[in-house]
Image: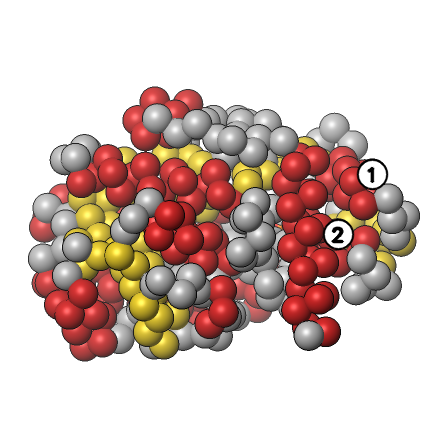
Amino acid sequence: MAVLVTGGAGYIGSHMANELIDAGEDVVVLDDLSAGFWWAVPPEATLVQGDAGDQALVARIIREHGVDAVAHFAAKIVVPESVVDPLGYYLNNTVKTRALIETAVRAGVRRFIFSSTAAVYGEPSANPIPEDLPLAPINPYGRSKMMSEWMLRDAGAAHGLGYVILRYFNVAGADPKGRTGQSSPNATHLIKVAAQAALGKRPFMEVFGVDFPTKDGSGVRDYVQVTDLVRAHVAALKHLRAGGESLVCNCGYGSGYSVLEVIDTVKKVSGANFTVKLSPRRAGDPAALTAKADLIREKLHWQPEFDDLETIVQQALAWEERLVRKNAA
Ligand code: UDP
């Protein structure tokens, strides 16, 4: 029995691979290494370089390793990039997910855990957002994930594939043991960018929009620590293996911080007073996204351990420093 982790050399997927190894699972990572790093994959896991949409390759992996569950992380994840390259996003996130679901069904895999996103809600009419709010994504990234959710639900109903769809809010921080973290040099996500500015890797950073209808005008997000997030996937795996029902759950803490609050926290924790510029809104950004976070606790017995912005920021800074040393070595 093994778990196939697509995108397992990437930020969230590599945390998942470590968490599964810690739990004593056999792990096969499938990653095209376009955004991931071979060294981020734990040595106990098998790394296959390839495409999650390559049906012959995936069928062979499932057969050879006795894969009983797929955790599908491989995706493009940058909202503004999806606005300028929608077809790239639909190919990578939607078309290849269709191929992967089909391969799993044909090979008799009965469990599928899918990385979805709060972006499926668009500009939500309620905050915190309940899972049953009608989906209305406002950018191609959100639509690419919404379509994957639909396919998974329909394939689940038609073919008996059990699934857990986790809608991530804003994932941040790093492995508390320091094994992996957000490593992309061109990352665009707020806490990563602020950590880079704090360490002098960027001359300044920008706040994208201070005219949103929020507490201080900047965007509000629910920042969830990455180890907590992947533990929800391990809980989902256990749930499905025990014969539990298919689920769609938000994965966030239920509280939001503004961009300006996050930047203040990074300045406080790092002690660095980096330059912050106020810039126009970024394409496709909603004002506020916070999770109604009850379902995941109830159904998966999820108990987060790192629900604290300062802790998340400390981990992000520690990983960023580690990257500096890694690159210098
Ligand atoms: N943001 C920002 N400056 C940056 C990166 C992000 O002001 O350099 C803002 C962005 O506009 C949004 C929030 O931070 O309001 C979170 O953005 P991020 O890209 O981290 O995640 P997203 O919510 O887009 O998935």
Quadrant in which residue 144 is drawn: bottom left
Q: Nearer the viewer, residue 211 or 91?
A: 91
Ligand 1 is within 8 Å of the C-beta of the residue at disc 2: yes
Q: Position of residue 318 (x, y in %)?
A: 68, 51
Q: What quarter of the picture does the N terminus occupy?
A: bottom left
Q: Is residue 6 visible?
A: no
Secondary structure under tag 1 reads helix
Residue at (18, 40) in percent of width and height? 241
Q: Is 85 displayed left or right of 221 in the figure?
A: left
**Is 296 in front, or is 227?**
227
Which residue carries the number 1 mark?
268
Q: In the drawing, does residue 233 fall left or right of residue 127?
A: left
Task: Establish if 185 lies above or below 2.
Answer: below
Occupied quadrant, residue 231: top left
Residue positioned 72% across, 58% down in the render: 321
| Cα–Cα span, label 2 and label 1 | 12 Å
Q: Which numbered disc flags the more N-terminal residue, 2 or 1?
A: 2
Q: Amino acid type of disc 1?
A: Lys
Estimate the x, y position of residue 300 in percent, counting from the top left.
32, 30
Count every numbered label the image shows and give the total: 2
Left or right: where does residue 6 sit relative to residue 306?
Answer: left
Relative vertical location of residue 241 with respect to residue 281 in this rendering, above or below: above
Question: Of tags 2 and 1, which is closer to the observer?
Answer: 1
Q: Which residue is mark 2?
A: 194
- What's the residue type where badge 2 is placed? Ala
